[in-house]
Amino acid sequence: MFPVKCIRLDYGADDPLLLEVDDDVLVADCRGPEGVVGEAARQLVTAALASATAGPPLESHVVPGDRVAIGLTGDLPQAAEIATATVERLISAGIDPVDISLLHAPPLVGAASPLGVAAAGIVAVDFDPAVEPQTSYMAADEAGRAIHLARGLVDADVVVSIGQYRWDAACGAGSFEGELWPTFSRRSCREELVRSLATRGRRAVDAWKTSNQEATWQLGVCANLRLVAGRGDTLAAAAFGLPDAATRRARKLAAGWRPKVHGTAMLTIASLSNPRGGLAMLLRAVAAAARVTHPGGTICVASRLAERPGVIFARWREGAPIDGLVREAVGTGDQNLIVDAFQTRFFARALGDRRLVLLSDLDEATVEELELGFAATPEVVERLAHRGESVVVLHEADRMLPRLI
């Protein structure tokens, strides 16, 4: 008999899953890096701002009298501590608090939620991409696409860009989130990105990254703070410096979310970083799990997901060809359908022929209508793990980009 390992998997319920797996069956138990919170997170950011990867520290980017805009993009771990550390360093460099503005842009895809942070009495203002007067035209990129950015960024003397560096297994690389553009651009620009991803898939990614570099250059951003999340709502690492250098450094620091796995498994059990996250988060988790799951295997996601997939997703699960569904959705011009088509296209590519089982807050009828496996209770997942012939466990899979070795 082989010894049994008991793995605790938190998925948002009061009691975690307790997965009992024989050592000879367990392929990998993958967890992200540990992070810090509170004052420790503030000190981590302060240290990064004082020792740039490339270029001068933050204080050298400004002189007294400068109007400084801090662009906070998407969701950030320990957001209040990050904002406070940045504002404190600017004030220590002689910048008057009245000349500092905090601007927050919602995620590109998924539900928008206010950041709700303040630092030294400065409250973050939520940028609304639907209000075009909040943006200014800057230039056109190589494809002739107009580059508009938030007026608060364009009018500032100095812009400090703050964003999370995270992996996106659905795109196969780093996430779009965390970039100033198109996050701080108009809604029409965001919609064009989603439409491009729906029609072209991963082929659209590189072109949009090039446009972001153009927008960053046009804005003259030299102060870039890249953050790496830890497990839960913690901060694992921070890198500051010129945009390209800070991003490269953050990519290395995010290696903890790129676990090495010795071969694929017939069963992968995954959780989400936000147990109640939506379909965009589920997509990233499934894409990450698929990288380490045999093409004929099973992916089981344990969460508190309650968001029902859209009509495009449902029709794909009923057997309709994905290309036709995408063309139909894009042809309607309905942004909700286009987002649905984009997510469905990437979902289909990631899942392949694998079976997907959900432990969630969705009811049995909804899950079975989607031709997905329904786990009625945590015990169902625990039995799957105990009986699996080869098992991988991914904690907070939506943050991961596993590597097969």
Image: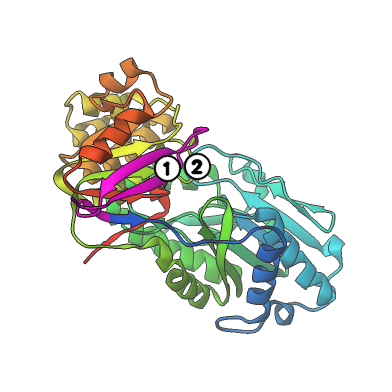
Which residue ends up furthest to the front in the rendered image? 1
Provide residue 71's location: percent of width, then percent of height.
64, 59
Left or right side of 69 for 132: left
Q: Residue at x 21, y 52 (%)?
A: 2
SS class, disc 1: helix
Q: Position of residue 195 (x, y in %)?
A: 36, 42
Instruction: Determine which quarter of the picture holds residue 379.
Output: top left
Asked whether residue 74 is drawn in magenta, I would say no
Q: Which residue is mark 2?
A: 274
Q: Which residues are magenta?
A: 1-27
Indicate the amino acid at tag 1. Met
Would you say residue 292 is visible in this rendering? no
Q: CB atoms at circles 2 and 1 under 8 Å apart? A: yes
- Looking at the picture, does residue 228 appear above or below residue 112? below
Rendered location of residue 10, percent (x, y): 46, 42
Whether residue 363 sits left or right of residue 230 in the image: it is left
Q: In the image as oriented, which residue stretches furthest toward the left? A: 296
Give, as a three-letter code, the residue at label 2: Asn
Is residue 20 within the magenta segment? yes
Front-most of 248 and 214?
A: 248
Find the distance from the CA under tag 2 to the CA under tag 1.
Answer: 8 Å
Query: Would you say residue 261 is visible in this rendering?
Result: yes
Q: Which mark is residue 281?
A: 1
Residue 267 or residue 272, whichever sits in front: 267
